[in-house]
Amino acid sequence: NAGVTQTPKFQVLKTGQSMTLQCAQDMNHEYMSWYRQDPGMGLRLIHYSVGAGITDQGEVPNGYNVSRSTTEDFPLRLLSAAPSQTSVYFCASRPKQGFSYEQYFGPGTRLTVT
Amino acid sequence: GEDVEQSLFLSVREGDSSVINCTYTDSSSTYLYWYKQEPGAGLQLLTYIFSNMDMKQDQRLTVLLNKKDKHLSLRIADTQTGDSAIYFCAGPSGNTPLVFGKGTRLSVIA
């Protein structure tokens, strides 16, 4: 298994540009989520999904969209990038059943918005 | 929902014990977790404790849980330079993903 994969690893955007951060998992996990990590702020939940076709907002959803058309993929879209969205983005997944300690993280995407 | 708090920095000498503390608010949390993040990497599960346990030991790691005070701690015995990382306390919040503390940056001085 590749686990949770994220692309790209690094990205630089100009203010106002849009882009999609990709996340995929091959473990057939129902739950997937996106976090952002900023210095001194820990990980903050952006959006999450409990299954294909179902998404919900987390703590900091503004400026981001998600969709979950398949179990494997959970892309995060930045609609109009702003410097405040400069951050490291982590995707995570876990199975619906079983112990929730089985949450797996991707390696992260480092995004800079100028 | 869950709120998790932890101190931001800890510095220890190599060979000493490190103790990282965390407080949480959701008394219904069934599991509490410690994740480790090394520089430039994602988060990896370090250890976890079930809420009906007071203590869990795993090699150099000891997790203590005080449910009455909603306090969780992670003790690393014989701390090594390779233990330098950010350590996150985390707890579940219903059916939503894990809620993380801000992370404690552990620096180990040789």
Image: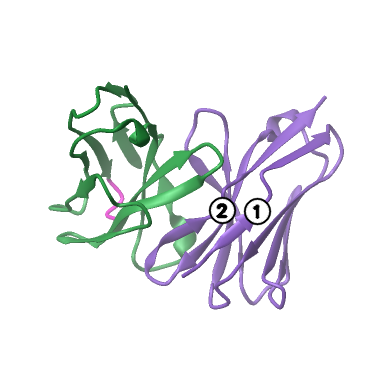
Q: Quadrant of the N terminus of chain A?
A: top left
In the picture of the structure, the residue carrying the numbered disc 2 is B101
Q: Position of residue B55 (x, y in %)?
A: 74, 66
Magenta span of residues: A26-30
SS at badge 2:
loop
Q: Position of residue A10 (x, y in %)?
A: 34, 23
Which residue is rendered at x = 50% and y = 67% of the image? B2
Q: Position of residue A49 (x, y in %)?
A: 26, 59
Of residues A95 and B19, which is closer to you in this image?
B19
Which residue is rendered at x = 84% and y = 44% of the image? B17
Query: Does A111 sit above or below residue A3?
Result: above
Colour seen for chain B: purple
Q: State how far apart marks 2 and 1 are (Cα).
A: 6 Å
| Of pointers 2 and 1, the one earlier in the residue sequence | 1
Of residues B69 and A18, which is closer to you in this image?
A18
On screen, residue A69 versus residue B59, left or right, reads: left
Colour seen for chain A: green
Residue A75 seen in the figure: yes
On screen, residue B86 versus residue A21, left or right, reads: right
Query: Does A6 sit above or below residue A26?
Result: above
Residue A2 seen in the figure: no
Name which residue type carries label 2.
Gly
In the picture of the structure, the residue carrying the numbered disc 1 is B6
Q: Quadrant of the C terminus of chain A?
A: top left
Return the chain for callout 2: B
